[in-house]
Image: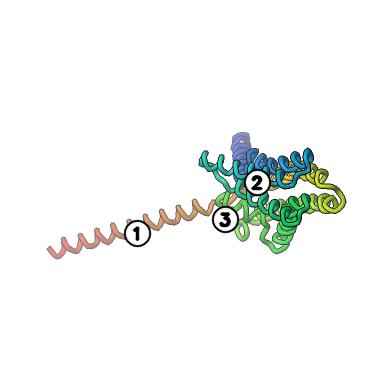
Amino acid sequence: MTSLDKPTEETDQHDARAVTEAALFEAFGGLRGMVETVLPGLLFVTIYTINKDLHMSAIAALAVSLVLVVVRLVMRDTVKHAFSGVFGVAFGVVFAMMTGNAKDFYLPGMLYTLGLGLAYIITTLCGVPLIGLILGPVFKENLSWRTRNPGRKKAYAKASYAWGAILLAKCAILFPLYWWANTAQLGWVLVALKIPPFLLAVWLTWVFLAKAPAPIDVFAEMEAAEKAEEERKAALAEERGETTGARHRREA
């Protein structure tokens, strides 16, 4: 390796890390997505801690979720994270209202976390890591990593195992509290466990992917193939035109 090669490799690594950071930011919503995830639950537990009013707490949480969606729509921004928050809060509100137990506001989200943690582990064991399915389209590689990029598939497997382990560890804390703690205690622990485990999982994903081979841009490949096909057809048409012209000249 020459001294001229090092800056190029360092630049490539820096570019790869920047692309990975941008993709993770897009996939998981960044700071704004985290706020939208935490705010409804924080509002619920705050109001319930103060006045123990299930209906007021639930309505406030649902209302703020809807406001976040409206803000996204007004700003013409992506609404997938806000909408997922609305559905999660709505399920919690309906469940708590049906049972009359304020702790059940959190149960659908806890069950979702448990299911998601298991999904990360099971899909990885089946050879199709869930994090790869999530991030593949973001990196414009789709499923090319499964058969054409083994180093990247290995990184996705590591990241999926990390997500699964972190989410299942979170469940191991929350489900005992669901049975033993009161609503306020469970709510505050849930709020406290919203961001740190998420950030740890995202950071580990970044670490694994930053060291992995670059993604294969299948969209660029398709565009290049289409362009090559158009050029081939144009060249063939031009050749036919020249052949026809030559024949006409001979006949003349």
Cα distance, mark 3 to mark 1?
A: 28 Å
x and y, in percent, of residue 76 in the image: 51, 41
- Specify the quadrant that holds the C terminus: bottom left
**Displayed quadrant of residue 125:** bottom right
Do the residues bearing badges 2 and 1 touch, measured as CB atoms within 8 Å? no
Residue 148 x, y percent position in the rendering: 60, 58
Horizontal side, residue 227 vs residue 149: left or right: left
133 or 194, nearer to the observer: 194
Residue type at the position of mark 3: Asn
Compared to 168, does 15 lie above or below? above
Q: Residue furthest left?
A: 252
Callout 2 crowding tier (Cα within 10 Å): few <14, some 14–19, many ≥20: many
Residue 142 got which mark? Answer: 3
Quadrant of res 3: top right
Alpha carbons under labels 3 and 2: distance apart? 35 Å
- Side of 176 where 136 appears, left or right: left
Vertical arrangement, residue 107 with respect to residue 244, above or below: above
- Under circle 3, the secondary element is loop
At horizontal 70% and vertical 64% (from top left) the residue drawn is: 126
Residue drawn at point x = 49 percent, y = 54 percent: 221
* Pick the front one: 152 or 78: 78
Q: Position of residue 2 (x, y in %)?
A: 62, 37
Q: Mark 2 points at which residue?
A: 62
